[in-house]
Image (cartoon, grey):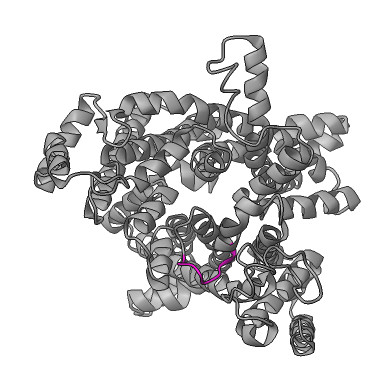
């Protein structure tokens, strides 16, 4: 670690803390967002997420070494954490801290994009099924039944293992396309109850088209469960990617993801635990923050709590 | 909960499993590489050709599909190219291991999870609740394979309390036939089951706490308290009983998760179960073995859901009235 990287790390910490504080100050004005910040874990979760996103974006400033460079495979492999190597070095003498920082880019990127794809698809299918009902509903939901019964990890293993070395985009696509079934069921049941409500009936009576009714009237009112399932989805996708990488079939090495860092160093865990410990801790921290934020959102947007 | 409802659900379940098998069949045949060429050993192309012919892999895909389905309906799961034995044998051999692991994990999951959830709900927002709440949030967020490595490191290597892999002592206990071997099996089971069970228990505890609190504000709970019933009875008979309804649904969902979650855990702990079998089958492009393991896994999912619905109908008289109605809509 050089002075510059320490400084950049410090700036990232301050920026994350300031971000959360600014958000909180604005939130005081609204009852529902006050509820969001009432939980201490939620506030912390938001701060940790903000910090890690800043770290991922500013990776070149915060990582002291090239994440893929093998510094000195004879003398510097499996070094314990020190001031030079904050998280130690791995079995190929690469700096674990730098790899964790760069790994955040890939891991968070896959998590966010995969969940975005899954939630968009799930919302669309759920909205169509719930709104049009009849045969549209029947066909789509039977498809979802099959999707939920698919052993997802098998499908992904097959997709990734059989087509050797999927590029980043294909991995995101594969994960996104197999992760939307639960969301679609959730959205469907939400839409089913919303479409009976007066404001939707009124909008239709005024001559609004189906698209307008769905996107302007129905879906905004189903935002709470969608946002919650998005937050949980990012965590799930991240865990899924890590599992795949751990089985040796995710992103191609040497590019670091938290999952393949654990996989690469699992065999030396008895002698150099740090190189598996820290990436695993990073995954847990992100997933925990996302779960905490999801809890907060669920609380804040719960329509039952708004009633007097 | 009528016969017609059950029959309809059964037919739907079979249809779902059929669709899953079809999907897997298409996917694995669309992938590049054939079982024979996929193996690492150097095999003469002529031998490969002959093997592929022998197993009918040179036929057009629709014909292969038809043959597979016909065989499947007759109860024949096919022949595993990579293991050189019938698929059914391999599955029958590995399934008990997966069930033992899943069963032990489920037991820990539900006992610990339910206990913690109920305990927390009784002390909402007080210190024990906050501490347990944060702990379960953290454990619930751990990647299972990483937790497995940590437990291995601490209890297997550093403390040496438990074995680091395998399902039994290969010399003394190749088969479980004595009390000593039973103990040996349980001893081997502790770490993998704890890994799966702990993460599951954290989720169950969070879920159960929320379910208990949902019920806590209901009128009948207030009535029970107003009648002067002891707190214990209010919690166990009135709150818990109704909170358990949503728990049944969770049970149906947890079962298949344990099975697929076992893919990683079985690989790490060298547990000779179905998850590892499936993983190896995929890597060797063993068509019939992959399809068969997917068939078993999806049967578990569908079966778990069906079981949960039946149990719900038995446990909740309100649902019986609306037999055939959308049960999930009521429980969502």
Residue at the image position 22 percent from the left and 44 percent from the top = B43
Residue nearest the observer in this picture, A111 or A132: A111
Asked if one can make out residue A35 in the rendered structure from this viewpoint, the answer is no
Residue nearest the observer in this picture, A29 or A170: A170
Q: Position of residue A213 (x, y in %)?
A: 40, 75
Quadrant, the N terminus of chain B: top left
Is residue A281 magenta-colored? no
Quarter occupied by residue A41: bottom right
Is residue A257 magenta-colored? yes
Residue nearest the observer in this picture, B197 or B311: B197
Q: How many numbered tags mark residues here?
A: 0
Q: Position of residue A232 (x, y in %)?
A: 58, 61
Residue at the image position 53 percent from the left and 16 percent from the top = B175
Q: Is residue B6 above or below residue B261?
A: above
Residue nearest the observer in this picture, B220 or A299: A299
Q: Is residue B286 above or below residue B80?
A: below
Magenta-drawn segment: A251-258
Quarter occupied by residue A31: bottom right
Residue at the image position 71 percent from the left and 57 percent from the top = A272
Q: Is residue A81 left or right of residue B279?
A: right
Quarter occupied by residue B73: top left
């Amino acid at each position: 670690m050089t002075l510059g990287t320490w400084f950049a790390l410090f700036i990232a910490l301050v920026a994350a803390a300031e971000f959360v504080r600014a958000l909180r100050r604005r939130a005081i004005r609204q009852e529902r967002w006050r509820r969001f910040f009432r939980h201490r874990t939620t506030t912390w979760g938001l701060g940790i997420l903000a910090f890690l996103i800043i770290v991922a974006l500013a990776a070149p400033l915060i990582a002291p070494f090239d994440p893929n460079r093998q510094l000195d495979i004879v003398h510097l492999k499996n070094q314990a954490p020190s001031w030079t190597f904050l998280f130690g070095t791995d079995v190929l003498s690469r700096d674990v801290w730098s790899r964790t920082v760069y790994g955040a880019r890939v891991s968070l990127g896959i998590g966010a994009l995969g969940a975005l794809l899954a939630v968009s698809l799930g919302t669309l299918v759920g909205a169509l099924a719930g709104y049009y009902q009849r045969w549209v509903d029947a066909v789509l939901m039977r498809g979802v039944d099959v999707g939920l019964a698919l052993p997802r990890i098998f499908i992904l293993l097959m997709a990734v293992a059989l087509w050797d070395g999927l590029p980043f985009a294909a991995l995101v696509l594969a994960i996104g396309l197999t992760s939307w079934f639960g969301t679609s069921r959730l959205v469907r049941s939400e839409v089913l109850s919303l479409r009976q409500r007066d404001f939707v009936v009124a909008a239709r009576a005024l001559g609004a088209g189906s698209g307008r009714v769905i996107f302007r009237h129905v879906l905004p009112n189903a935002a709470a469960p969608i946002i919650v399932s998005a937050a949980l989805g990012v965590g799930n996708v991240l865990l899924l990617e890590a599992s795949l990488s751990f089985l040796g079939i995710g992103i191609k090495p040497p590019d670091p993801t938290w999952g393949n860092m654990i996989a690469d160093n699992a065999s030396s865990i008895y002698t150099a635990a740090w190189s598996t410990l820290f990436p695993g801790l990073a995954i847990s921290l992100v997933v925990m923050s996302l779960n905490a934020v999801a809890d907060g959102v669920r609380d804040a947007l719960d329509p039952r709590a708004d009633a007097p | 909960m009528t016969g017609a409802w059950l029959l309809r659900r059964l037919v739907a379940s079979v249809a779902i499993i059929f669709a899953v098998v079809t999907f897997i069949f298409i996917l694995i045949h669309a992938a590049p590489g054939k079982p024979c060429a996929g193996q690492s050993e150097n095999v003469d192309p002529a031998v490969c050709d002959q093997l592929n012919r022998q197993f009918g892999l040179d036929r057009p895909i629709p014909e292969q599909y038809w043959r597979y389905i016909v065989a499947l309906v007759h109860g024949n799961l096919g022949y595993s190219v990579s293991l050189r034995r019938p698929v059914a044998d391999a599955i029958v051999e590995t399934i008990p291991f997966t069930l033992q692991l899943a069963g032990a994990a489920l037991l820990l999951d539900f006992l610990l999870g339910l206990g913690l959830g109920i305990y927390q709900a009784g002390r909402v927002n007080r210190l024990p609740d906050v501490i347990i709440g944060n702990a379960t949030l953290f454990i619930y967020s751990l990647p299972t394979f990483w937790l497995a490595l940590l437990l291995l490191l601490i209890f297997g290597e550093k403390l040496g309390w438990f074995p680091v892999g395998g399902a039994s002592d290969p010399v003394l206990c190749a088969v479980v036939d004595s009390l000593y071997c039973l103990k040996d099996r349980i001893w081997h089971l502790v770490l993998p089951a704890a890994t799966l069970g702990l993460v599951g228990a954290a989720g169950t505890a969070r879920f159960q706490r929320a379910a208990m609190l949902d019920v806590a504000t209901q009128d009948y709970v207030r009535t029970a308290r107003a009648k002067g019933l002891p707190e214990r009875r209010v919690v166990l008979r009135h709150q818990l009983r109704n909170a358990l309804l949503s728990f049944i649904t969770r049970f149906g969902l947890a079962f298949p998760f344990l099975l697929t979650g076992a893919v990683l855990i079985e690989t790490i702990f060298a547990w000779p179960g179905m998850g590892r079998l499936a993983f190896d089958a995929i890597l060797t492009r063993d068509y019939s073995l992959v399809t068969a393991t997917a068939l078993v896994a999806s049967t578990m999912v569908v079966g778990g859901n069906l079981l949960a619905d039946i149990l719900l109908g038995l446990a909740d008289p309100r649902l019986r009235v609306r037999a055939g109605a959308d049960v999930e809509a009521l429980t969502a």
